[in-house]
Amino acid sequence: MRYRPYFKMNKAICLISAILMLSNIVYAQKKEFITVPAGSLVENCIPFQERYRFSGFCDGKVFFRNGAFADTKLNYNFLLGDMEYIQAADTLSIANPSEILLIAFAADTFFYQAGYLEIIREGPIKVAVRQSLSLKEVMKRDSYGSSSSNSSTDSFSSIETAGKTYKLVSNQDRVFEKTVQYFIANTSGSFVPFNKKKVLQLFPEEKEIIQEYLKTNKIDFDSKNDLLQFVGFLEGL
């Protein structure tokens, strides 16, 4: 389904939202929030480069578990959590992603494990990342234009993805959160959350050495650079 064109009438509102988003980035690096004002389409306030992994649809190869493969132009949609491809004039999501072995681009590789994971480090110990843009909160507006928070957000997620369109909700501000989660491969090749507990489970015989390393080196498990440095140490054990 093709995305709707931008509406010029929402540009000023979206600009304000972008300023608020930048403010959040400055004061909270690990959590980024984007507000889509009431009366605005999501795609008008969250630009393409924020919604997708790549700046455009790129040549990629999809390898399926049954041995089949397909060449097509693809891009990963953070908002929908889908790998999308171009067919004629339509943008479609890959059906049955659990049947995918991997998706290879020129310099990037994705696996599917209860969601798409992008490999950020190959080698004896693989590291992957999952990035998403999810609905965090809905702010309802009253007749005076004031907003109030609705903390029960789970029931609203389908509003944003039904029919693969970003729907207009006239009386609700929607707050989206950008999240980044890191994973480490275990001995079976599956990925588990990259945190201290999981690492100690993966390396039980080196538990004391790892704990001592973590005392000396303050590893931030939300930092890509810290985790890649940590993996380098683990591979040397």
Image (cartoon, helix red, strand yellow):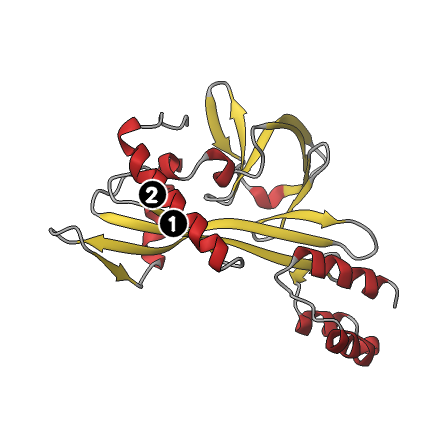
Looking at the rendered structure, the secondary structure element under dot 2 is helix
Where residue 225 appears, x then y in whole percent?
A: 70, 56
Q: How many marks?
A: 2
Position of residue 117 in the picture relative to residue 140 (left or right): right
Q: Amino acid at mark 1?
A: Leu
Residue at the image point whose x is 73% and y is 36% from the top: 107
Residue found 62% across the figure and 28% down from its top? 58
Tell me, yes or no, whether the two marked residues, 2 and 1, touch with CB atoms within 8 Å: yes
Is disc 1 placed on a helix, strand or loop? helix
Near-viewer residue (112 or 26): 26
Q: Marks 2 and 1, how far apart in space?
A: 6 Å
The quarter of the picture where residue 76 lies is top right
Residue, far left:
143
Quarter placement of the C terminus? bottom right
Residue of label 2: 16
Q: Position of residue 18 (x, y in %)?
A: 40, 43
Q: Which residue is mark 1?
A: 20
Residue 117 visible, this angle: yes
Q: Quadrant of residue 106?
A: top right
